[in-house]
Amino acid sequence: MWQVYILKCADKTFYTGITADIKRRVKEHNGSILGAKYTRGRRPVRLVYTSRKKNKSLVAKAEWRIKNMSRLGKIKLIKDKIS
């Protein structure tokens, strides 16, 4: 099962990505050279949102939509998921 995720970085910015193993991926973002270049200088990161999809194509489309949202749109998405 694929997931799209949002991380909140130490500098309060957001990073969006996709993965099939969320625990491994967050660990990579926080302590490995395998984490995204963007998050390496913004550690620690915290997982604030995930959404599962049936296949990689659907999750990639969701990632694209999230990456094109404004910061306020991402905050609303995160809050709506928590509620």
Image (spheres, rainbow, N blue to C red):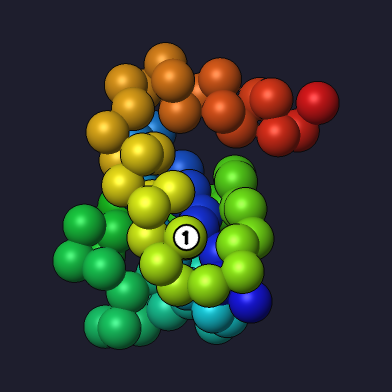
Left or right of 19? Residue 39 is: left
Residue 31, image x and y in percent?
Answer: 41, 77
Residue 21, image x and y in percent?
Answer: 57, 80
5 or 29: nearer the eye? 5
Q: Quadrant of residue 11?
A: top left
Residue 81, image x and y in percent?
Answer: 70, 34
The relative height of residue 33 versus residue 75 in the rendered view (above or below) is below
Q: Is there any visible trace of residue 9 in the rendered image?
A: no
- For the point 33% across and 27% down, the residue is 69
Instruction: Classify mark 1: residues with Cα within 10 Å, few (<14), some (14-19) or many (20+).
Output: some
Placement of the C terminus among the 4 image quadrants: top right
The relative height of residue 58 versus residue 33 in the rendered view (above or below) is above
Residue 23, image x and y in percent?
Answer: 62, 76
- For the point 45% across and 28% down, the residue is 74
Find disc 1 in the rendering and name its residue.
58
Left or right of 38? Residue 6 is: right
The relative height of residue 15 versus residue 55 in the rendered view (above or below) is above
The total number of labels drawn is: 1
59 or 77: nearer the eye? 59
- For the point 59% across and 45% down, the residue is 48
**What amino acid is found at the position of numbered circle 1 in the picture?**
Leu
